[in-house]
Image (cartoon, rainbow, N blue to C red):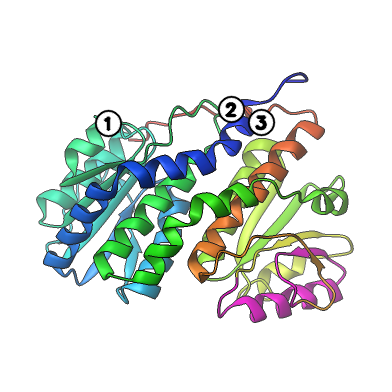
Amino acid sequence: MQTTGQTNMRREIDEIPEAAARLLDHSAKEFAAAGSALRAKDPAFVVTIARGSSDHAALFLKYAIELTAKLPVASIGPSLASIYGTELNLSRGAAIAISQSGKSPDIVAMADAATRSGAISIALTNTLPSPMADACRHALDILAGPENAVAATKSYVNSIVAGLAVLSEWTGDAALKRAVADLPKHFAEAVKLKWLEFAADAGEAESIYVIGRGPTMAIASEAALKFKETTGIHAEAYSAAEVLHGPVALVGTRFPILALAARDAAEGSVAEVADELVAKGARVLITSPLAATAKPLPFVETGHPITDALALILPFYGFVEAWSRSRGRNPDAPANLTKVTETR
């Protein structure tokens, strides 16, 4: 157990604003080139290729692309190429491959297959050169810098920032482009927020639900993974539209639930569900002032619904790192995990 000094995870969380600023300052040409290629291709659909936290980044980009570019986005299982040897026809589409290391064999195989099929393929990676970068038509260095903690934080955020920057160039969405440019200053505010109330309400819980909807569902998925990785607590992410079906059967007195809501069209519905879960005895905390009985958590308003959702991950990362240490764990080195899993 790490008991003295600052953890790598905490340092890397604090570096997120600077890492985002570095990416936006140095990659404008790369964003423009990828966006131009997507406009020229005019894809009929987009597919994503990723695993773990990178797949949660891809899920966030799925919602952002569907809301902004109005195109369907699907996640492709990398094993289709690496294990099953299936050649998909992606000639009319675009493919976004995300990997911090850029060397997981199954991700590389699927990215290569997408490129060979004729898709406009874009690699988002923290490692250039890398096999995944070589497999794609466009390779963007997310410039997160070295990430030593096993649990990804700044590489997750910068993968999304890069994807949103490309999306704004592709679609010509001026509001999104301004919102992305403003992210470093909003991140600097968000990283300082404290979610101590959730730690107090969660107590000694061994199971937690994280709920969201739309882009915040992607943040909920990442949060649930980080609970598992850093605290050893079982956590599951559910859409606010689905949690009142089967999953609610497990909710009882003092069951802890984190409800993630952004300032978007889904905020009201997430707040309503949060209050319904409180009525069933759960201890619910929510990033919204709209709930009547769920307890509010602090958040940063970015002025755009998509970037609002992304900013929620920073106070969560800070919370889960501190809670991991309070439970006697080392968030830098979760049990049974390594930084890079080279799945085949």
Q: Position of residue 217 (x, y in %)?
A: 55, 64
Give, as a three-letter code, the residue at label 1. Answer: Leu
Q: Are marks 2 and 3 in contact (CB under 8 Å)?
A: no
Q: Residues within 10 Å of mark 1 (few under 14, many from 20)?
A: some
Q: Find the distance from the CA under tag 3 to the CA under tag 1.
A: 27 Å
Give, as a three-letter code, the residue at label 2. Answer: Asn
Between marks 3 and 1 in the image, the one whose residue lies nearer the viewer: 1
Q: Magenta region: which residues?
A: 263-290
Question: SS for tag 1?
Answer: loop
Name the residue that disc number 1 marks.
128
Q: Earlier in the sequence, mark 2 or mark 3?
A: 3
Q: Earlier in the sequence, mark 1 or mark 2?
A: 1
Question: SS for tag 2?
Answer: loop
Q: Position of residue 152 (x, y in %)?
A: 52, 38
Q: Quadrant of residue 66?
A: bottom left
Q: Quadrant of residue 134?
A: top left
Q: Position of residue 6 (x, y in %)?
A: 69, 25
The answer to whether residue 68 is left or right of residue 187 is left
Give, as a three-letter code, the residue at label 3. Answer: Pro
Name the residue that disc number 3 marks.
331
Q: In the rendered image of this protein, does residue 127 appear above or below residue 210?
A: above
Between marks 2 and 3 in the image, the one whose residue lies nearer the viewer: 3
Quarter holding the N terminus is: top right
Q: Position of residue 17 (x, y in %)?
A: 53, 43
Q: Find the distance from the CA under tag 2 to the CA under tag 3.
A: 12 Å
Name the residue that disc number 2 marks.
336
Does the segment drawn in magenta span residue 253?
no
Q: In the rendered image of this protein, does residue 286 appear above or below residue 316?
A: below
